[in-house]
Amino acid sequence: MIETRLSSRDWIMDEYSIADISMLGSVRNLVGFYGAGDLVDYGSLKRVPAWLERGLARPAVQRGLEIPKKV
């Protein structure tokens, strides 16, 4: 479980890595696009939402979220 993995670190591995990159979109879409937060009890998690926020705040991720440009 991601929550357990993040109990002693900020990222899935010791530093931001491809593991985080590959999971950010899945978790973001699970909660946002699919609205399945209740299904996975997302509201009870503490570390995963903080991890998602950190990941989505990264400049490269922000640039990627703008492809294609929103009009």
Image (spheres, rainbow, N blue to C red):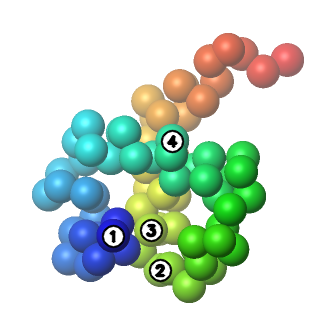
Please, which residue is most extreme toward the right here?
71
Marker disc for residue 1: 1
Name the residue carrying label 4: 25
Q: CA distance from mark 1 to mark 4?
A: 16 Å
Residue in the picture at 45% in, 46% down: 24
Label 2: which residue?
46
Q: Which residue is mark 3?
A: 48
Measured Cα–Cα span from mark 2 to mark 4: 18 Å
If the image is split into quadrants, where does the N terminus sit? Answer: bottom left
Distance from the alpha carbon under mark 3 to that under mark 4: 13 Å
Percent position (x, y) of residue 54?
A: 44, 56
Which residue is drawn at the image coordinates 71% and 51% (left, top)?
A: 34
> In which quadrant of the rendered image does the C terminus lie?
top right
Secondary structure state at the residue bearing disc 4: helix
Q: Amino acid at mark 1?
A: Met
Pointer 1 or 2: first along the chain: 1
